[in-house]
Image: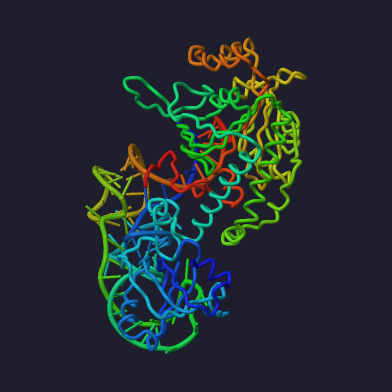
Amino acid sequence: MNISEILDGKFAGKDVEIKGWLLNKRTIGGVQFLIVRDGTGIIQATIRRNEVGDKIYDEVEDLAQESSIIIRGTVKEDKRAPGGYEIKVTSLEIVHKAERDYPLAKKEHGVDFLMDYRHLWIRSPRQTAILRVRAEVIRACRDFLDGRGFVLVDAPIFTPAAVEGTTTLFEVPYFGDKAYLTQSGQLYMEAAIAAFGKVYCFGPTFRAEKSKTPRHLTEFWMVEPEMAFCEFEENLKLQEDMVTYIVKRVLEKRRRELETLGRDITPLQKVEPPFDRISYTEAIDMLQKAGFQIEWGEDLGAPHERYISLQFEKPVFVHRYPAKAKAFYMQPDPQNPEVVLCADLLAPEGYGEIIGGSQRIHELKLLEQRIEEFGLPKEAYEWYLDLRRYGTVPHSGFGLGIERTVMWICKLKHIREAIPFPRTINRVYP
RNA sequence: GCCGCCGUAGCUCAGACCGGUAGAGCGGCUGGCUGUUAACCAGUCGGUCGUCGGUUCAAGUCCGACCGGCGGCGCCA
């Protein structure tokens, strides 16, 4: 059995055995209070000298934090115990006596220090809660897409050239040649839709930008669905449904973790389709009225996104950006070729962009023209152009950032807590 | 890359304006306490004040350079 089952009350009055780690210990006279965690939860165990004898009692007294132990005893309902249940220990086995100098104290630490010990920090209740939510978000993405007939197609990590030609990529030697770590699987998904219709990839992506913000990592995970015979509107519908599904799933399965994090769930409970939508042009208007110095044609920055996101209770789509501010492959709006059929989904509470998506150009001539306008090397995109030569169809897709989504759902201040071992501009250890 | 702030005990920080024997809490260690909730109480160990140079009788403190980190912006998911 595990601790979470005991805390659910399934073992009251019964004998149990749990295997775990010593989180903390308090000694008062002849009673020791052990705080034990096993990965599923945290429970208090009590040991009395006159009940277990001197040998066990003295051995336990000598145990340092993080020692691994197996305890056996009787579950007792007790209001004084955190969680309402505790274990009255009858016997205890020491698996490993941890060294005494565990670097993570019970009091506060700075984030940089904690990140140096990320391999130990992930044991803490707050971090395990976040990472469990992350696992649930990922599972929800896969379940949602699998349930709608999408086929998982893995995109390569080593790629021959930039996808969008704008961001800085990590260059790696490749048998006397050069390769780059992928910044997106999208182009490969565009190839895969002609094989399967609806596909998605899920994997790490890399950006060598020297970003120093609480919302950027150099290595992060994205889910990128892509659909054949799918136009702009249908793409937005799927995004709404998927984000709603993810949030509902976390609320259903990870309520305890959100409580641990102190997350107020009322904003999350409001997430229901349809989401609000405003055009880029409307957004500029809204921002100008609010006193921002921004002109039509400029891309939205972090303060702009934050402002817009705070005006809405639900996630909000900002759509139809100026073509010049966006990637070369985006389909122009037939109503106004100055703008493209793209949308960013901004999470509420000031969190900003969690999804970027668009309808892609499917016509060969137009795509060739765009590649030239953006000054990209046409040779590198020959295979991508082939997709427009042999059975091209209108198609759309998007990329959802896992860490950004986890950050919003858990209401984190910094994205680096949303991934087990974050990689940022100045951290590749541990 | 740009702007701002910070580097003092294992950790979190005070001391710096106004130069004069290096401080606190937590953690560790020793002891006390039979219901603690980041337990508490007493004692104790613990320092190349980021590095290099300069000013000075004297530098943690003033000046300069460098290194490292944090926050904001840009780039984006």
- Eyeballing the image, is A381 above or below B33? above
Q: How many marks?
A: 0
In the displayed structure image, the side of residue A40 where residue A115 appears, left or right: left
**Left-right relation of A181 to A12:** left
Residue A348: where, in percent of width, then height? 67, 45
Report the front residue among A53 and A182. A53
Which residue is drawn at the image coordinates 41% and 85% (left, top)? A48
* Image coloring type: rainbow
Rendered location of residue A38, percent (x, y): 45, 64
A398 or B69: which is nearer to us? Answer: A398
Check the image and report above or below for B7 versus A185: below
The quarter of the displayed image where residue B65 is located: top left
At 37% across and 84% down in the image, what residue appears?
Answer: A52
Instruction: State the residue at coordinates (43%, 56%).
Output: A121
Residue A362, image x, y percentages? 65, 17
Based on the displayed image, in which of its 4 quarters is residue A334 positioned? top right
Q: Is residue A107 above or below residue A113?
A: below
Residue A374, position in %: x, y?
56, 16
Residue A189, image quadrant: top right
Instruction: Name the residue rendered at 70%, 41% in the picture.
Output: A241
